[in-house]
Amino acid sequence: MKIIDAHAHVVQCIAGTGSQGELRPCGGGRAVYASGQVFQMLPPEIGEYDATPEALLKVMDAHGVEKAVLLQGNFFGFQNLYTHEAIRKYPDRFTGAATYDPFSFQADKIKKHLFQELEFKIIKFEVSNGSGLMSYHPPVDLDGEVMHQVYRHAADHGLTFVIDIGRPRNVCWQVDALRNAILRYPEMNFVICHLLAPQLGDDELLQQSLEKLALPNVWFDLAALCLNSRPETFPYPAARKYVKYGVDIVGAHKLMWGSDMPSAMTNDTYRHFIDFVSENPLLREEEKKQIFYDNARKLYFGDA
């Protein structure tokens, strides 16, 4: 089966910012927040301080993954230039997104550089209160003025808009506001990360939320979905149900497999991230083909 990884990250240097302050590498693939919390951020097979394009390609090649979409987030720190360099170096294997902080005083200059001079065609916004926009800024209304400036710019420049709204029951998880915002930009394609990041037991909440966001211009990636159902382990029966809900409610043609490599690989193997979907008995083979390859190829790589 052909595979595109619709959610991965390259990391030149860990330089994140989150609810616990700045995040910096401390050796052995570990990182430390300003609060003193230390955790394993990179798996040994990726790197000690970074996640190079070559390290990702090694994992992809070992698992028959043809292409990957390089996304952004505050967890690692913005990696715009490094992502751009990876895409230029391996144009047949990677595409990717840029991002920025809308509260930057010279945000207009940043946007011009990223989306006109560097010509990124995808924008990724993580707004979570753990390691996204709301982790170091006050809560932001996803249907409010700040975000509409972001949406409007993206729509005007023909960008695909990827957004991570964090986990349910947090201030960032604003499904109704996101729906209202998306309805104002029918010309722009949106991708919502992690299938809304449902936790174990969130069956009804996920189904209701997917129904609200089952819109013509909305897709979902499945990155790290299985890890959100911990303490379950492979084959992740709850996450398999959640994928089935996605197929039933928004359609298999609106779902894309992703790994959230490299940090997700500190919790389980890349093979298990593939197999929890590829061996899911609730899915038909044609649905798997769409989820693993066809949808991302069309949306991100412009292939019919």
Image (cartoon, helix red, strand yellow):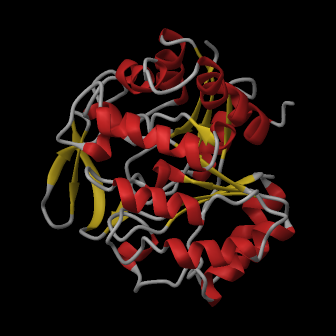
Q: In the picture, residue 43 is in which quadrant?
A: top left
Q: Nearer the viewer, residue 208 or 298?
A: 208
Percent x, y for residue 288? Answer: 58, 24
Q: Quadrant of the C terminus?
A: top right
Percent x, y for residue 167? Answer: 36, 62
Q: Nearer the viewer, residue 141 or 39?
A: 141
Q: Residue at x 15, y 67 (%)?
A: 35
Residue 42 in sight here: no
Task: Say if 279 sits above or below 149 in the image.
Answer: above
How many labels were placed on the picture?
0
Q: Residue at x 26, y 50 (%)?
A: 200
Q: In the picture, residue 69 is in which quadrant?
A: top right
Looking at this rendering, what residue extends furthest in the bottom direction? 145
Q: Quadrant of the N terminus?
A: top right
Task: Say if 120 sits above or below 227 in the image.
Answer: below
Residue 247 in sight here: yes
Q: Residue at x 53, y 45 (%)?
A: 246
Percent x, y for residue 216? Answer: 76, 57
Q: In the shown orientation, is residue 82 left or right of residue 242?
A: right
Q: In the shown orientation, is residue 56 left or right of residue 85?
A: left
Task: Say if 288 sits above or below 299 in the image.
Answer: above
Q: Nearer the viewer, residue 67 or 246?
A: 246
Q: In the shown orientation, is residue 26 left or right of residue 244?
A: left
Q: Residue at x 43, y 23 (%)?
A: 280
Percent x, y for residue 178? Answer: 58, 73
